[in-house]
Image: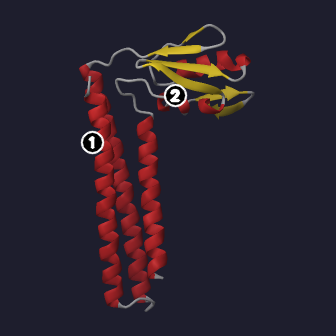
Amino acid sequence: MRDEILNETKERMAKAIEHFAHELKGVRTGRAAPGLVEGIRVDYYGSPTPLKQLATISIPEPRQIVVKPFDVSAAAEIEKSIQKSDLGITPQSDGKVIRLTLPPMSQEQREKTVSRVKDMAEECRVSIRNIRRDANKQADQAGKEKVLSEDEVKSLQSVIQDHTKSSEKEIDELLKKKSEEVLSL
């Protein structure tokens, strides 16, 4: 029972951190990155499809993203979806290739982006704490049902707390790295 609770807790915390790291890929820094556009949903024959499944995304220059659709007929829909996204970039298309030129970010934009990243990190921390709360409840329940002894429950809760701290440390490292990326000119 102890191992089940611990393994489930570790797995859920790892997924929360993985989700946070994935979200960070879509946050704009001063440089172009495929993660900025990969998740944009394009209406492809009636179904919303991620852009990365419809096109090759490359970065030929530090401030430019090139999207080359596998199916040229989808170029117009891809262009529309990019315009509708919250990127704030106007795509230039020649019908076959779509180019996105990222304008330099102002200091104010950088600070807003860092603030947004901090909010995302806090959401992830809250998620980690909720997972800890659930695991502690399971441990308490196992103690009440006499599946685990009192000492085992305390030991398990201590291990859960240690894992919570290490997960929060990992979140802080991801936050620091992304913040430095955004603020560097």
Amino acid on which disc 2 is placed: Val
Numbered label attached to residue 26? none
Image coords of residue 137 (percent x, y): 40, 75
At a point 67% along the width and 27% down the height, the residue shown is 43
At a point 73% along the width and 29% down the height, the residue shown is 46
Image coords of residue 4 (percent x, y): 49, 76
Instruction: Look at the numbered discs 2 and 1 and tell me whether their residues touch, using CB distance below 8 Å.
Output: no
Does residue 144 sit above or below 73 in this rendering?
Answer: below
Does 59 sit left or right of 125 as displayed? right
Numbered label attached to residue 176? 1
Element marked by disc 1: helix
Element marked by disc 2: helix
Residue nearer the viewer, 140 or 156? 156
Of labels 2 and 1, earlier in sequence is 2
Image coords of residue 109 (percent x, y): 30, 23
Tell me the residue that label 2 is attached to: 37
Does 154 sit left or right of 41 as displayed? left
Please identify the quarter of the rendering in which residue 146 is found: bottom left
Image quadrant holding the C terminus, namely top left
At a point 45% along the width and 75% down the height, the residue shown is 5
Pointer 1 local density, CA inside 10 Å: few below 14, some 14–19, many at least 20? some
Please identify the quarter of the rendering in which residue 40 is found: top right
